[in-house]
Amino acid sequence: MPGDMHKLIILHTNDIHSHFEQMPKIATVIRKLRQSYPSDAVITVDVGDHMDRMRLETDGTGGRANVEVMKATGYDLAVPGNNEGLTLTMRQLEEAYTHANFDILASNMGIIPSGQLPYWLKPFQIKEWFGMKIAFIGVTAYYPDFYQLLDWKLSDPLPTIEAWVGRLKQEVDSIVVLSHLGLANDQRMAEQIPGIDLILGAHTHHLLEQPLRVGETYIGATGKFGQYVGEMVLTYDTSRKQLQQIEGRCVAVESYEDAEDIVQIIDQFKEKGTAYLSSTITSLSRPLTVAWRQESSLGNLLASGVRRWVDAEVGVVNAGQLLGGLEEGPVTKLQLLHICPSPINPCKFWLRGDHLALALEQSLLDEFMDKEIRGFGFRGKVLGTLCLDGIDVAYDAAAPAYHKIKEIHINGVPLEPGKQYRVGSLDMFTFGVGYLSLSKGTETQYFLPEFIREILEAQLSYGIDYDRFSVPRWREIGAAH
């Protein structure tokens, strides 16, 4: 390259969500790209949600499988996304990341009450290269109420980044932000905070096959599930310590061969995860069934478990959380992972009777039972009807929509439309997805780190009243009633 022009290469991934089948191909792409440049000119980063506990390799190893794959692939920096920070305890994250040979960056995560970062987490990292200093600042999605339940203190991302940029621009020659905030926030960051050369994004699963330019800042991202590896080429005039150009692309990994060493690591940790999750929880003397368009014994058991866990008057869950039933005989953690993979947490809130009644009416309609849901932690296929505990409903299936329900009883007492009820349910409903009237609750309390499959495990361990969970909560009656 003429004069003092030099290229810094940043290879980046995001939102892989434990798609281990993609990781051997990702490693091949990263290694081939690294070979195209001088070894000291390439930095490899992951911008969060590499982990997802729906996969046994992650769930059964506390994220260790992901870390070992990242080490072998050759990552230099990583940001914990919400799938790392909110689905593992602080201790579990520490145990996973202490095995890393790469730096973990998140400038807006700290420990309650001081806000100080734990020893294994850094706000930024500076790379010195050809006499220049390039800062990489990490930042993660802002869910302060949820993180607080896991003893994390999160600071508002954009003011935090603005403060770090203000400080670091006096010390470094170029600034890159690794942002697990989503595209809209990345665009806002670029508009509001001068001095950032490049933002590598994540969280909203956006694919930018060419860098997006906002003002003087470029933004890149590689979509989701390990389908692409990003390659950013930053050309600097190192004598003047000035950035001259940013070019980028996303490389589809589909056609590349698997890296055999990564395959072996994954197989090794899959075996370890399987062994851990194969421990027996209980043994069933009869099957527990699941159906998405009607109540079922396992659906009712889950509703009862959530109600019991959060200490509510009633339990309300959607049947689509359960992807299958349980046969007679031993039940393992691995079976529960397979039938209930969603990283969804229980919660409780006060809900007015008429809002509860509306959700119950909607759960009798095909458009809700068959509604496909994306995001919000849901790893199922369709929403499904509502499974209940503490609620009994009499309905006429032939009646018009929103006029099917004839009676609702709450623990044996007729529902009052204006009365507030303490409802045990699932966090995704509070985000305004599925049965929207359930999001109108107040004084919501979330329960972390337990997923609903762990609630299911606890309820199964308590001892199972098969007859109780088989008793219908929904009773169909004729129009003449």
Image: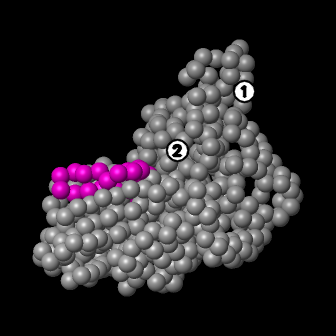
Tell which of 331 and 37 is nearer to you.
37
Indicate yes or no whether the magenta region holds residue 123.
Answer: no
As rendered, which of 318 and 225 lies closer to the eye?
225
Crowd class of label 1 (few under 14; some 14 to 19; many from 20; radius 10 Å)? some
Coloring basis for residues? one colour
Amino acid type, callout 2? Arg
Q: Residue at x 79, y 54 (%)?
A: 326
Which amino acid type is shown beneath numbered disc 1? Glu
Query: Which of the 4 quarters of the picture holds residue 257?
Result: bottom right
**At 67% across and 49% down in the image, what residue appears?**
322
Q: Position of residue 120 (x, y in %)?
A: 40, 83
29, above or below 425, in the image: below
The disc, 2 or 1, on the residue closer to the chain's N-terminal end is 2
Check whether the beta carbons of the residues at disc 2 and disc 1 lie within 8 A of each other.
no
Q: Position of residue 264 (x, y in %)?
A: 67, 75
| Tag 1 secondary structure | strand
Q: Is residue 304 left or right of residue 180?
A: right
**Residue named by callout 2:** 374
Distance Cα–Cα, label 2 vs label 1: 31 Å
* Callout 2 secondary element: loop
Reading the image, the residue beneath label 1 is: 476
- The residue that appears at 29% across and 71% down in the rendered structure is 7
Q: In the rendered image, is residue 149 in sight?
A: no
**Which of the two discs, 2 and 1, sits closer to the camera?**
2
In terms of image quadrants, where is residue 114?
bottom left
- Judging depth in this view, the residue of 451 and 63 nearest the camera is 63
Residue 42 on image: x %, y %: 37, 74
* Image position of 64 with respect to 449: above or below: below
Look at the image and give the residue range highlighted in magenta.
202-221
